[in-house]
Amino acid sequence: MSKQSENLLTAIDVGSAKVVAVVAEVTDGGLRYRGHGIADSRGSRRGLIVDLDKAVSSVQKAVEQAENATGAAVERAVVGVAGPHIRGLNSQGGITIGSRPRDISKEDIKQVIERARAVSLPPDREILHVMPQDFIVDDQHGIHDPEGMPGMKLEARVHLITSATVAAQNVVTVLNLAGIEVEDRAFEARASADAVLKQDERELGVCVIDIGAGSSDLMVVHEGVVVHTGVIPIGGYHFTNDLAVGLCTPVGDAEMIKRSFGCAVVTRIPEANEIEVPSVGDRPPRMMAQRLVAEFLEPRARELFEMTRDHLRQAGVIDPSGRGFCNTGFVLTGGGARLAGLADIVESVLHKPSRVATPASLPKMPAELAEPEFATVIGLLLYGYLARMTRATKHESGPFRRLKSFFARARA
């Protein structure tokens, strides 16, 4: 197998249910799919690494499949970070340009962003992302690029995404033990948002809810910038576990029942429908009403979105009347978003429109990856490419612009 080429980019999503590795090729026209691998996740739970050896084995299996499909070794990768330890906060900082107006330079912008990110954090936490929102030149607000503008005072408003140091480092350790260097890390909801949001949603205001197996990650975007991030400690596993307990069936069978017959709205299931439910141990399977499945799933769905509503209200993102930054509603993605009827529950609880989103497709990408559960890994590819280009040059080169254009067209 050949050594990884410099024009290949790999993204790895170490989820609680599965590990996905996708390899893409960087071309003049953007990213092109080359291969992928999927393995059951054995060492991660609720967004956290709980068993290093099992997690390493899962990553190695997924990467080996991707290498076989690509014909090249995977040595570096962009990896996602998620889980209940993620926190978001907004910060502001400023600098004095001078006693008389002068043109603002790139160095001034860099300095004011550093000032805005200089917040006091506990020793066990670190900054994962610094995301500029806007700048203030003297008393003029809402400036997106102040370079070249004359002014005496420059302020920056930024959104900081922080993580528990140990939790984030454990993901890096797993990849390192699997023989892979971590090229970049990204909050998974940020990656998913890059893969699924349309431009008008970003401008008017939207909340992305990435429903993973162990938790649901939130990101609110308004006027093209991130204004809030958070995590709700409910994911697809909780729905499955409710079914396993309620139906007295093994967890694996409960997952299959959820995928095949599950619905978050009881009234959408005909009363006469019946399904076969496996029993625990040596007991024979039973015939049960399909509505019973929905009766266990709907309360959990309502709990998830009621917690989301309360979280967003507490953060000041929406008010009790629903006004705020989520003007176009909610975009659901992640594997948990595939449960039928979830969008209806969102609209019932949050009184805003919602949709289930799939990631933008890459050229040559198989249809099986164009599903909500792969939004994160596709978004990680985009994030990794943009980060690589930013490091390579301080100016937007042709390939950088072409890739942004490609994804903008894919989301339109």
Image (cartoon, rainbow, N blue to C red):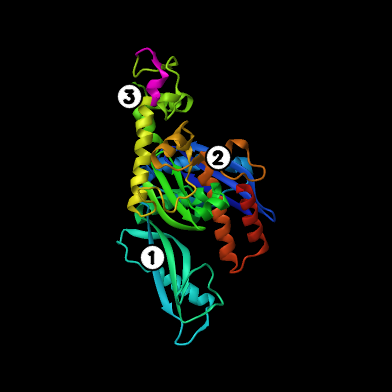
C-alpha distance separating marks 2 and 1:
39 Å
293 is within the stretch colored magenta: yes
Mark 3 is surrounded, within 10 Å at the Cα level, by few (under 14), some (14 to 19) or many (20 or more) other residues, namely: some
**Which residue position is annotated with label 1?**
91
Mark 3 and mark 2 lie on one chain; the one further toward the N terminus is 2
Rendered residue at 48%/25% (across/down): 260
What residue is shown with label 2? 37
Distance from label 3 to label 2 (Cα)?
Answer: 34 Å
Q: Which mark is residue 358?
A: none
Query: Mark 1 is on which residue type?
Result: Ser
- Mark 2 or 1 closer to N-term? 2
Q: Tell me the SS state at disc 1.
A: strand
Which tag, 1 or 3, sits closer to the chain's start? 1
Answer with the quarter of the image where residue 22 lies.
Answer: top right
Return the residue found at the far bottom. Answer: 99
Which residue is most to the right?
Answer: 28
Residue hosting label 3:
246
User: Could you tell me which secondary element the residue under label 3 belongs to?
Assistant: helix
